[in-house]
Amino acid sequence: MTDGPLVGLDETSSRALVRPGRLSELLADLGNVQVAVPVLAVALGYVTWRHRRIGTDQWWLPGVSAALLMALVPVLVIPLKVLTDRPGTPAVPPATGYYPSGHTATAAIAYGAATLLLLPLLRSAGARRALLVVCAALNLGVGFGLTRRGYHWPLDVLASWCLGTILLTALWLFLSRRLSRSSRRTSAGTPSRRTGPS
């Protein structure tokens, strides 16, 4: 990612965006592992507890799936950084390996997976909309903070959003298929292991 038709546009955009400040630093920090992963862990704990409490078949599956997806982020991002070997912006010390943004990918998966797990448990459409808005705001804030502070080029952030979209879509499809199969089995009268005979 050190050459190509988009690199010039990316560098021009970065020069226009970079204005380091306290707010951009705080927004960028929302993508730190120490911030984003505990948020996901709390959501995983709550969702797992709720599914077990209501007797959902394979109550552990959503939490384990999201945790594995989070663990997959460095496995995918680090080789991409090594492969592209992109230098950082002028605002950071000279180094390479900035593409894609690990902070953006961490935020996308942590906040996105937490949202996907919590959505089915919310009863009102307003609460679901509010959760989606919060998730989008957190991820946009991280991306803005990283580019505004100069930690990443805009394309570094966009690449991680694309990766996050693919991974979260896969998680959503997997869980939708598994949970709909489980609910079909329950509605057909097949007892779950937790609830016993109907």
Image: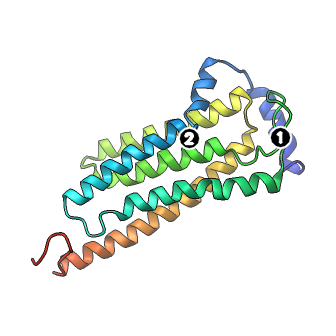
Q: What colouring does the structure picture have? A: rainbow
Q: Residue at x 17, y 78 (%)?
A: 191
Q: Residue at x 68, y 53 (%)?
A: 77
Distance (Cα) linking label 2 and label 1: 30 Å
What secondary structure is found at the residue carrying circle 1? helix
- Which residue was labeled with disc 1? 9
Query: Dot 1: few (<14), some (14–19), or many (≥20) neighbours within 10 Å?
Result: few
Q: Is residue 16 above or below residue 195?
A: above
Measured from the top left, where is residue 188 in percent x and y? Answer: 19, 81
Which residue is situated farthest in the right direction here?
Answer: 3
Q: Quadrant of residue 19?
A: top right
Measured from the top left, where is residue 66 in percent x and y? Answer: 45, 57
With 140 as the anchor, is 193 left or right in this view? left
With 35 as the anchor, is 13 left or right in this view? right
- Which residue was labeled with disc 2? 33
Between tags 2 and 1, which lies in front? 2
Measured from the top left, where is residue 62 in percent x and y? Answer: 38, 61
Q: Quadrant of residue 73?
A: bottom right
Which residue is situated farthest in the top direction here?
Answer: 22
Which residue is situated farthest in the left direction here?
Answer: 198
Measured from the top left, where is residue 154 in percent x and y? Answer: 73, 39
With 164 as the anchor, is 56 left or right in this view? left
Q: Is residue 177 above or below residue 127?
A: below
Type of amino acid under label 1: Leu
Type of amino acid under label 2: Val
Foreground of the two, 193 or 156: 193
Quadrant, the C terminus: bottom left
Q: Is residue 44 above or below residue 154?
A: below
Q: How many marks?
A: 2
Are dots 2 and 1 in contact, CB under 8 Å? Answer: no
Q: Residue at x 70, y 26 (%)?
A: 149
